[in-house]
Image (cartoon, helix red, strand yellow):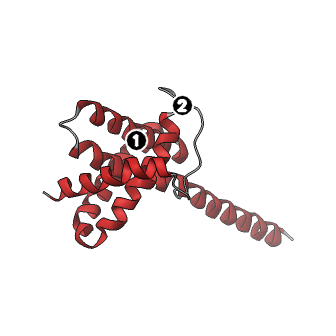
Amino acid sequence: MKILITMAVSAGFAIGMSGLALAQAESRLATQALHCSAIFSVFEQTHADDAALAKRFKRGVDIFTELYVKERGGDAAAAKAAAEQGRAALLTQFRDKLAEREPYLREDGVVCGAWAEGFFAQGDDWSFVPVYPKVIGMGARQQYAPLAAESFERWKR
C-alpha cells in the first residue's frame, strides 16, 4: 500500500511539473507581440528621420514589449530582457531571410499595424488587448502596406 501511495504521489508530482513546464512556454499572444515589436522596430529604425513617425513606432515597440512581458508573467525584468533578446534575434532572422521573405514581412507589417491601431486608439494607457487581426480593414491596409514596403526597402540598405 505504501508503494502505491508513493507511486501515486510521484506520478502526481511529475504531472504537476510537466504542467509547470507548459505554463512557462510562451503563449501565442506573447509570440505575436514579440514578432510585432520587431516589425515596429524596423519601422522605427527606418523612419528615424521623421520625429512624429519614429515616436509612434517607438510607442508600438513599447506596447508590444509590455504586452509580451505581461503575457509571459513572472519576473518583469527577466521578461523584458527576454523580450529584448528575442526581438534582436528576430531582427537578425528578418535580415538574414529578407531576400526570400520580404513579401511576408511586409504583410506582417500590415497585420501588426492594424493590431497596433487598436492599442493606439486607447490613448496613452491601454487597458485591454485588441483581438489579433485576421481580417485587415481597408484603412489599415492603405496606411501600412506602403509604409511596410518603404520600411523594408530602406532596411535593405
State which quarter of the image contains the N terminus: bottom right
Percent across and percent down for residue 141 are 43, 53
Secondary element at tag 1: helix
Q: Nearer the viewer, mark 1 or mark 2?
A: 2
Mark identifier at residue 80: 1
Horizontally, residue 6 falls left or right of residue 19, namely right
> Badge 2 is on which residue?
122
Residue that appears at 54% across and 31% down: 122
Callout 1: 10 Å neighbours few (<14), some, many (20+)? some
Percent across and percent down for residue 138 are 48, 52
The amino acid on which the numbered mark 1 sits, given as a three-letter code, is Lys
Callout 2: 10 Å neighbours few (<14), some, many (20+)? few
Q: Can residue 27 be seen in this view?
A: no
Secondary element at tag 2: loop
Position of 129 relative to 98 (above/below): above
Residues 5 and 105: in front is 105
